[in-house]
Image: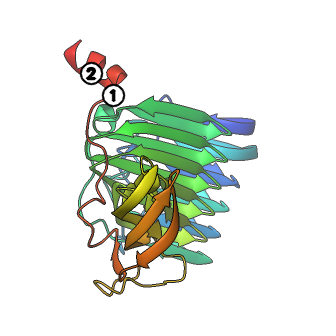
Amino acid sequence: MNNAHEHDFTGDITLNGGEETPISVIDAENVYFRRNSVTGNVKLINPEYVFSSQRPTEKTVPSDDIETTVSGSIEDIYVPHNAIEGTIIIDGAQDVHIEPNAITGDIEIVGEEQLFYNQLTDSPYGHGVYDAHGVGWKRSVSVSDPKHGVSVTGGRCTAEITDVTADIELIVSGWNNTIDITGRTAMVTVYLLGSQNTVRTSPYIDLETDIQAGVENTIEQEPVPASDIIETTRKEAYAGHLLGRDTVTFQEPATDRDYCPNCGANASAIITRRQEDAFFLTNTPVYRFDAGGNSYECENCSVNATPDIQLSEEERKRVLG
């Protein structure tokens, strides 16, 4: 029976699995297929933009015998984990986001304005093992010391991921989301779908982008600060020399260099190592006998460019229980 169930909605909705399939969704603004959300087929008719980690299967998905029709002034539709068993047809959506491993069956796309597709390199962890999920409009999520991963789905969401020391995954799906990651000696694998999303990390996080399907997305990593490479500053080297001649060694940022003269790498933290033979009076060189030559190093070649791997007091308490 066609149109056996008709639902008229306004705003954001979530399809939680109670709808009989096949389902037809008409004129939604944004559609989000989350991981493992559809055990069946998906057909997209005349979408504007599709951001997908799954390739269309080039098979026809039937769009007749609709059991449930969802329409109205729909803004965002979220299709969560294990929501639909059967076929869903999305007709006239603006943006459609298909996260990794979202759809088990066939995917047919007809009349799209633009398809942004990027093939998965490695399949991410399952939905249930992630440490945190942020879903919706202007939602925020905060997680410390994650073990597996974090996902953000929607628009204008923020996520703060701190104290990352284990290799984790990050899925970002949607528009204008901002994610900040801090930690050390860890790898973050990023799956990024949509537009105008920003992922920012601290210097000692390794980033691997498995998927970036979209437009105007930004992945930024803070540069290693020169202070992390400097062992002794000029002020520290001069301290303690009240009166007399002595030789001191110190390091300073080489702000006039765009690449490292030592290893040739483009670098953000280049320092110069200086040595001075001077006569000191109250911690100040009043006469230099020899200023010595300069040597250079950067975050790529310096043995000092490593993060502090000692546990903080809070981290020790957490590890030891």
* Residue 77 disc label: none
Q: Is residue 117 left or right of residue 169?
A: right
The residue at the point 40 percent across, 82 percent down is 266
Nearer the observer, 17 or 235: 235
Q: Position of residue 135 (x, y in %)?
A: 55, 37
In this figure, which residue is indicated by the disc labeled 1?
312
Q: Residues within 10 Å of mark 1 (few under 14, many from 20)?
A: few
Q: Position of residue 153 (x, y in %)?
A: 53, 45
Nearer the observer, 152 or 221: 221
Q: Which secondary structure lies at badge 2?
A: helix
Nearer the observer, 53 or 182: 182
Does residue 69 appear anywhere in the picture? yes
Marks 1/2: CA–CA distance: 6 Å
Q: Position of residue 319 (x, y in %)?
A: 23, 21
The residue at the point 44 percent across, 43 percent down is 151
Above or below, 77 relative to 257: above
Q: Quadrant of the N terminus?
A: top right
Q: In the figure, residue 119 lies in which quadrant?
A: bottom left
Of the residues shown, which amino acid type is indicated by label 2?
Arg
The answer to whether mark 1 and mark 2 are in CB contact below 8 A is yes
In this figure, which residue is indicated by the disc labeled 2?
316
Q: In the figure, residue 100 lies in which quadrant?
A: bottom left
The residue at the point 56 percent across, 67 percent down is 217
Q: Residues within 10 Å of mark 2 (few under 14, many from 20)?
A: few
